[in-house]
Image (cartoon, rainbow, N blue to C red):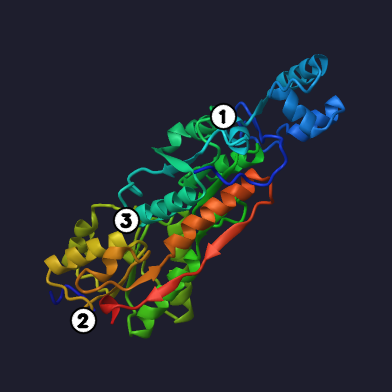
Amino acid sequence: MVNTARSKKPSAPSAAEAPAATPERPAGNGKRRMQMTDIARMAGVSASTVSRALSGSPLIPEATRVRITELARSLNYRVNVGAANLRKREVQTIGVVILGDSMQMISDPFLLSILGSVADTLDERGMSLLLTRLKDNRKHVLSDLVESGQVGGLIVIGQLTLHDYLNDLTRNGFPMVVWGANLPDALYPVVGGDNAQGGYLATRHLIEHGCRRIAFFGDISHPEAGQRYQGYARALQEAGIEQDPRLLQSFLFGDTRIRQVIDGWLDQQLGFDAIFASSDVTAISLMGSLNERGIAIPSQVRLVGYDDIALAEHVHPTLSTIRQPTAEAGRALVDLLFEALAGQPRRAIVLPAELIRRESSA
């Protein structure tokens, strides 16, 4: 324990020919928006007739086209141009949107690994990706990308504070899938790791090695880190270990204040014998800060990270961590997006968490 007393062409989804419906802007009030099937019912025609009429097909009599178009306009209905073009193989691009601020930089190795898998999977389908990054004050960009026809669908990385907005977009027929935490009230398709189990495995591993003063580094307001903290808390409770709130550090991904926190703990003689960090980037930063203060890992402090980025097995000591399978994640994101484009029911994929034991916790 440390105590400072010691120092190609796309594979089009099999769906009905009617393009997905989206409103001009989601109201965010939870009300159901108009769908193409509603237009068809009101006009007394089939959904495919509505689809052809709104696309200007000469197969539909002019009077019927005008009647359907006017009805759609009066109801503020707008065709999802991107999804319609993707079905017709006129758009071969999928938008990948990173919801980011200082919490998760685009250069994060774990994030880059997922992006690489997504790009490879899209390439196999003869498609490319358009990458963009935005903060929550520009959330309208998500709907703009699809409505403008730039992309056929969206892969959103992260949730930030936009969970409710993502639900609104889903209610309104926007084709997308999200990488993040599988939240109980999520309406959108989601792919993510078993964060609660990962946090539990990491903490239990440290407890089994005799640790009792285990610190947690991670922003618990972030959905994924919050679930990892839940696993951490469960492991402590099962072992009969009372949490010390001073050892909970609500750190954003990539936060630079780690050395400042470690210095403060050591200067205040706050004892700790292990740290569970909610990302490998944070864990590796902690390694450096502890080393600079002469704290040996793992003999004085044991350390476990999260993600299993490539660097984890090349630092010294090698980093114990919770592995997230990024190759499977990328494929799952693309698969669920095409399911959404095909109008299939929403589902979630929770990828298993695996403890990787290395030197930092030996």
Residue drawn at (47%, 64%), measured in percent from left and top? Answer: 195
Helix, strand or loop under label 2: loop
Alpha-carbon distance for marks 1 and 2? 57 Å
Q: Residue 147 bears which disc, if any?
A: 1
Q: Is residue 242 visible?
A: no
Q: Position of residue 165 (x, y in %)?
A: 56, 39
Q: Residue 299 bears which disc, if any?
A: 2
Q: Residue 191 bears which disc, if any?
A: none
Q: Amino acid at mark 3?
A: Pro
Q: Residue 109 bears which disc, if any?
A: 3
Out of 40 and 103, give the one closest to the viewer. Answer: 40
Alpha-carbon distance for marks 3 and 1? 31 Å
Q: Is residue 224 visible?
A: yes
Quadrant in which the C terminus is drawn: bottom left
Q: Position of residue 277 (x, y in %)?
A: 33, 65
Q: Is residue 291 left or right of residue 347?
A: left
